[in-house]
């Protein structure tokens, strides 16, 4: 069983340290990271917490899922592993060949009229 927890629907005021202290009630927290928007520096409203054992994770999930934080009911469950190819459409080979030649001149430059 995984030792990584997903925490969602977080208020933007939650910080790494406040997250760590709340989860520390259920065991040893090895990492706690609120995901931030690269451009704005603002919280994305979700985080990941890693604990030392699956039992600690389960205790934290049972104790914190649905808890109200600043008026928001937080979601706490085991993190799902990332799927291969996520992000920018997956398989490059497919993407490159999936766009038909639209026929507007020479690669979009000149011609046509």
Image: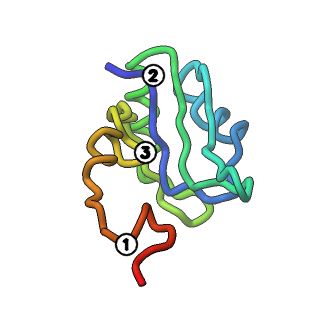
Point out which mark residue 56 bears. Answer: 2
- Residue nearer the viewer, 57 or 92: 92
Q: Secondary structure at mark 2?
A: helix
Which marked residue is nearer to the observer: mark 2 or mark 3? 3
- Residue nearer the viewer, 47 or 94: 94
Point out which mark residue 104 bears. Answer: 1
Tell me if residue 73 comes above or below residue 62 in the rendering.
below
**Mark 1 or mark 2, earlier in chain:** 2
Left or right for 40, reference 112: right
Residue with the most extreme bottom position = 113
Among the 4 quarters of the image, the one containing residue 53: top left
Among the 4 quarters of the image, the one containing residue 34: top right
**Mark 1 or mark 3, earlier in chain:** 3
Identify the residue at image location x=42%, y=63%.
106
Q: Position of residue 8 (x, y in %)?
A: 48, 50
Tag 1–tag 3 contact (CB < 8 Å): no
Q: Position of residue 113 (x, y in %)?
A: 42, 84
């Amino acid at each position: 069983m995984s030792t990584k927890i997903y925490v969602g629907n977080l208020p933007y005021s939650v910080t790494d340290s406040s997250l760590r202290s709340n989860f520390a009630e259920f065991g040893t927290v090895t990492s706690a990271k609120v995901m931030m928007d690269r451009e704005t520096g603002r919280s994305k409203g979700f985080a990941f917490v890693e604990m030392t054992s699956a039992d600690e994770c389960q205790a934290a999930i049972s104790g914190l899922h649905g808890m109200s934080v600043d008026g928001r009911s937080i979601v706490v469950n085991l993190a799902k592993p990332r799927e291969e190819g996520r992000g920018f459409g997956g398989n490059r080979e497919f993407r490159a060949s999936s766009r038909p030649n639209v026929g507007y001149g020479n690669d979009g430059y000149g011609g046509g009229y």
